[in-house]
Image (tube, helix red, strand yellow):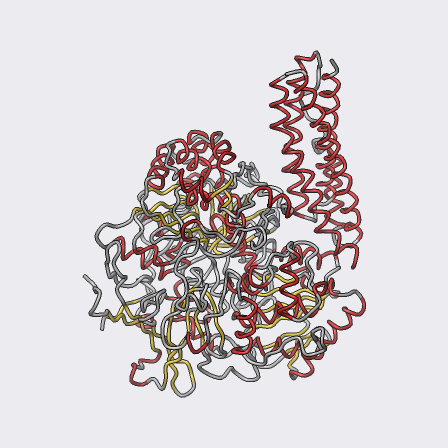
Amino acid sequence: MKLHLAIEELHRSENHLAGALLAMSDRHKADHEVFHVARDIARWSQDHVRALAQAGREFGLDLDPEPKGDPTLLEKARQGASDLLGRSSVPGLLLLANLRHVYREACGTSLDWELLAQGAQGARRKELLQLAERCHPDTLRQVRWANGKLKESATQVLVS
Amino acid sequence: MPRTDRIAEPWGTRTPYGAGETWPVRVDTFLADGLDEGDVDRWVQSATILHSNGDGLDIAVKDERIVGVRGRAVDRVNHGRLGPKDLFGWQANHSPDRLTRPLIRRDGELVETDWDTAMDAVAGRAKELLAEQGPSAISFYTTGQLFLEEYYTLGLIAHGGIGTNHVDGNTRLCTATAAAALKESFACDGQPGSYTDIDSADVIALFGHNMAETQTVLWTRILDRLAGPNPPEIICVDPRETPVARHAAVHLAPRPGTNVMLMNALLHEIVGNGWVDTAYVEAHAVGFEELAERVRDYPPELAAEVCDVPVEQIRRAARIIGTAERLVSTVLQGFYQANQATAAAVQVNNIHILRGMLGKPGCGVLQMNGQPTAQNTREAGADGDLPGFRNWSNDEHIEDLARVWNVDPMDIPHYSPPTHAMQMFRYAEEGSIRFMYVTATNPAVSLPELGRIREILAQERLFLVVQDIFLSETAQLADVVLPAATWGEKTGTFTNVDRTVHLSEKAVEPPGEARPDLDILIDLARRLDLRDKDGAPLVKWTDPEGAFEGWKECSRGRPCDYTGLSYDKLRGGSGIQWPCTDEHPDGTEHIYVDGQFWADPGYCESYGRDLVTGAPLEPTEYKALNPSGKAVLKAAEYLPPHELPSQEYPFQLMTGRTLYHFHTRTKTARAPQLQKAAPEVWVEMAAGDAADRGLGEGDLLEVRTPRGRVEARLRVSGIRPGAIFLPFHYGYWDEPDGAEPGGERGRAANELTITDWDPASKQPIYKTAAAAVRRLATADGPSLAPTTTGSRPVTDGVPPTTGGEAATASEEFSPVGGGPR
């Protein structure tokens, strides 16, 4: 039985995704929708981190229920800097790069949820399966957001 | 003939009527200078232009000048009535400070010039940028106040000619969520309700909609129902004690930013108590299971705590709505300009879908507009959408539009959702939009966070063109100013909230060299040498009627089908509701009859968006979700607002409207009766909050947020505790410094608002900014805020708002179908 490995990996990737979303938010404070939505949906990953820490106990895991990646002083400084840099066109390319990063992180996390769901089904762990069914749709929404935002932003950045 | 002070009595005299009866006629007339009807040379047909209600009126002309207005008794919308803004607002047409010549910036100053020089400068800069960067440098920011013909021509020039994706209107600030909510629930824009539904409804629910002030004549219709036999019950959701709230059976005053929480609790009760038309839902909707599961998590007890509303009031409102036999709901800025705008407005649609209350008399949703012609920006493709409710992510729709315009489909940008207004200003801020052509709107007062907006508009690298009738705050920042004709000086059509199309004819000549917006746009197209794929001129018309005929072809077969209309048909009688076709020559009162929607994947305007992230659904996702084109029940989770009160900023600031002014007061402040009724900005606060801080009526306060400061006199009003309210109309054009605050404090509410918007509709949030207040000076008298409206004082000693003899208009009651009782 290696389900604990899947939970551990997912706990790590959700933490990472939350961190990536929050960092992206801080770097693009002048792109107001990115700033706010990235924060709103980072919360989903943080909820998942808590739920996974809870679920992990049954499998002998001692995972930190407190999500990592809350804004630190360094991030606050980044927000200030991004506000100032917002008047030039360089952040456009950076935005595309960051969206691409978040997209890949979210896709990886989505796959991890699929792995967990498959394992939970095989092991007939109903609660774990329900957890996956509850959380995975959030991850898919994060994927679609990064994809949609990338599509929407790309043209102006690339042709201007 | 009774004469009434229409400033003191904004809704005039009651003509009561009962459920199912016809609303009696009452013809309101105001003529200037003591003239009477016998003095008038001619009456010219039009409709009202200072709100979205679309009331039919005739313009009185004497000696080639407008001298007054009279409501049209035959019109289905108003049955002869007019509101105060309509009775008095036309006087602004004659204002001595109208723009009469083009202006161009020379050595930093705007100086008068001729049309050729001005238009060559505009077209020349556009051509330079097209050569250097391409269409991505060019943007158009329009309004909700031009005519249909002008929007259609503008959309053609921008989308089909220049090929830019950057076209939007200030309708983004007023009606974007109405359109977005309809697209989410019905996959297409198009108003399900009709004003006549008010005549037979037994429950009318107003969600964040102070109809008494924003659509005075529609509210008059409700007041007349309330005064008659079998009156409807009113439900009001509004943090302020508005005139609507005072007539409500239940008034819910939630904390700003918590609308979705409240709506989910109402739906929780409706689903939980089985007030669902199960047969209708099974036959005509998808998504019930998900919605039911979602609202299970939102019991009224939870909402009572989060929204700070008594739990029994939530239950009572839900019961009245849930057991209504004929339910009308209306929605406006209290939802559209608030946190989770689209998600909240969609829940209102959900109530109607669940209860099967669509497409029949007395059962309608009115997702309202703020401006008179906002509906046309949506239909004709000047708000970023494509004309005729075509779907930008459906290639067949793009090909069809390219056929109508005779251009290559590749020339019509459709690679992503159209750029919304807030994003256009962002692109201008980062420097990739370098040309902005603003028509008939004033972003330097109406957009959020004005300090930022002024900086963007004032950039040297941005070429700013402003086409307007006055030198607005925005025009003062322009490189070229083009003087336009306005209502009464040009011909065109426009469409109101309930799909009623009116013709507005030219009554008098515009002042000086001012020209109709349509003429200016056609001139621009000619100077840019825009052509179709066969080399013929892209814009194929030279006058409004030609543009209307062009639009009719574009609308053929689409939901907003105008093919059965013509200028001749619109002359003489009442306005007519679209769709109007050969099969339905008298127009269509109710759409969505028998659960037939425009939601088929091949036909619909939109595949929808994620209500939290705003991500558009892919065509395949929509086809899987809704293969047979039913209504979509879309659930939403509650998210708290992004800016919450803190110790430093303990209040929640809402901005909004007053009955006597429109937009940034460019017209209404130039009508003496209206300006006198609401002469200066004020701030509203609840009595308890004021007492806690030792503040009193009329004290001069500073209202502060992290973005700016505003000075305003305090009106202690019936607003809910913890919230404060500022009207957004007051800018700087009639102050010494003209375009911006003279000192460190301003008076425009948008100095304070936050740059944040709903991800689904992209409508800015004006109803939740954390704010602080402090007293600058004690009162030397009460605030001058109106006493007749949402700003009614709760303390004694405030003199009532009146207009006196100058504001007296006549009311003529029809002998048939009732009269004053």
Residue A72 vs residue B556, the one in the foreground: B556
Residue B112: % across, % down: 64, 81
Residue B471 vs residue B389, the one in the foreground: B389
Q: Quadrant of residue B123?
A: bottom right
Q: Is residue B441 above or below residue B35?
A: above
Q: Residue at x 47, y 30 (%)?
A: B296
Residue B751: % across, % down: 58, 54
Q: Quadrant of the C terminus of chain A?
A: bottom right
Q: Is residue B444 visible?
A: no
Q: Quadrant of residue B355?
A: top left
Residue B389: % across, % down: 56, 59
Q: Quadrant of the N terminus of chain A?
A: top right
Residue B206 vs residue B428, the one in the foreground: B206
Q: Is residue B656 above or below residue A45?
A: below
Residue B808 vs residue B304, the one in the foreground: B304
As drawn, is B141 to the left or to the right of A25? left
Seen from this angle, which residue lies furthest left?
B821
Q: Residue at x 71, y 76 (%)?
A: B534
Give the tally of numbered discs.
0
Residue B163: % across, % down: 70, 65
Q: Quadrant of residue A6?
A: top right
Q: Residue at x 32, y 67 (%)?
A: B81
As drawn, is B213 to the left or to the right of B229? right
Q: Is residue B249 visible?
A: yes
Q: Is residue B314 above or below residue B33?
A: above
Q: Is residue B507 above or below residue B627?
A: below
